[in-house]
Image (cartoon, rainbow, N blue to C red):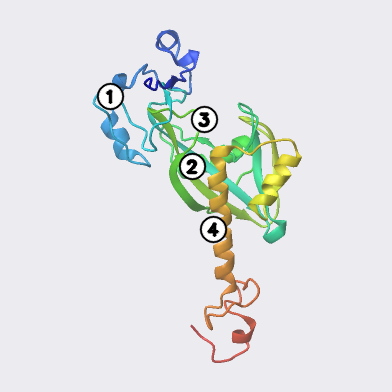
Amino acid sequence: MSEFTPMDITPPELLPSALARHVPTWAEAAPTPCDVHDWPQRQASALVPFDLDERGWPMNPGGRTGHTGRALGKWGENAAADPIVVAGTGDQRQVLLITRDDIHVEAIPGGMVDPGETAPETLIRELREETGVDLSDHQPVILSQGIVDDWRASDHAWVASTAALYEIPTEVDAVAGDDAVAVAWWPFGTFAQLDAAIAAAGSTLYAAHRPLLHRALDHLAKANAARRTCPACRRDAGYVIPAALGMCVACADTPSSSF
């Protein structure tokens, strides 16, 4: 049986000869991981812990990818942030997606964390840059921090994302900006509803973002169930309990109700 040989996915602009002439603004200058001199710092700050092999090259903590080289900005972990914006509730719920300008699929807005920037700052910046939506006055729920199955990942360079959920009452105007050829609100009552709407439009949902959107729906379902449970009597009220009421109507009508 022949030995498996991974495919080198390094684009022309990141080959050593090209980097010697010009370094793209989105990439580091190191032609190989051996030319990176701050691995201890990168390992200490990584979202997902990773090791170096016997050559001193970073090893993808998600396992072998079948790809070598680098198609991302940095060797090792490339930190990203993905803001999931949801408007409305139940069957009327909508999610904000962009059409990416590189692979032309529907995706969550988001992008790489810039040097000196925090993930929360990136969430706000990327959402504003790609959709024109400013949610800097909203506090999101962090859904996950981990490896995503990015098409540019290799055995030595990968993406680790902070995915966050923003809930707003109704849709807001959005305009396609950086890295987006279009932006739209899509039905998000269920995942099947989202898939069907995107397919009907003749498009495809970015595979790497499917798990993140599933997590968002799971969180919303659990939060909705919690809001239906009365903290006083612990019964399902049959409806979402208003925060101002704090308990189901039956308990609120009972003068001695407290918790």
Q: Residue at x 67, y 50 (%)?
A: 192
- Say few, some or many: other residues with alpha carbon within 10 Å of mark 2 (under 14 / 14 to 19 / 20 or more): few
Q: What residue is shown with label 1? A: 37
Q: Determine the CA span between mark 1 and mark 2.
A: 27 Å
Depth-wise, is mark 1 or mark 4 nearer the camera? 4
Amino acid type at mark 4: His
State the mark number for residue 219. 4
Of 127 and 149, nearer the camera is 149
Residue 117 position, x and y percent, is 44, 37
Q: What residue is shown with label 3? A: 151
Q: Work out whether residue 132 can be spotted.
A: no
Amino acid type at mark 1: His
Q: Determine the CA span between mark 1 and mark 4.
A: 40 Å
- The mark that comes first in sequence, 3 or 4, is 3
Of 247 and 191, nearer the camera is 191
- The mark that comes first in sequence, 1 or 2, is 1
2 and 3 marks in contact (CB < 8 Å): no
Which secondary structure, mark 4? helix
Amino acid type at mark 2: Glu
Q: Work out whether residue 148 can be spotted.
A: yes
Amino acid type at mark 3: Trp
Q: Is residue 223 above or below residue 26?
A: below
Q: Determine the CA span between mark 3 and mark 4.
A: 26 Å
- Say few, some or many: other residues with alpha carbon within 10 Å of mark 4 (under 14 / 14 to 19 / 20 or more): some
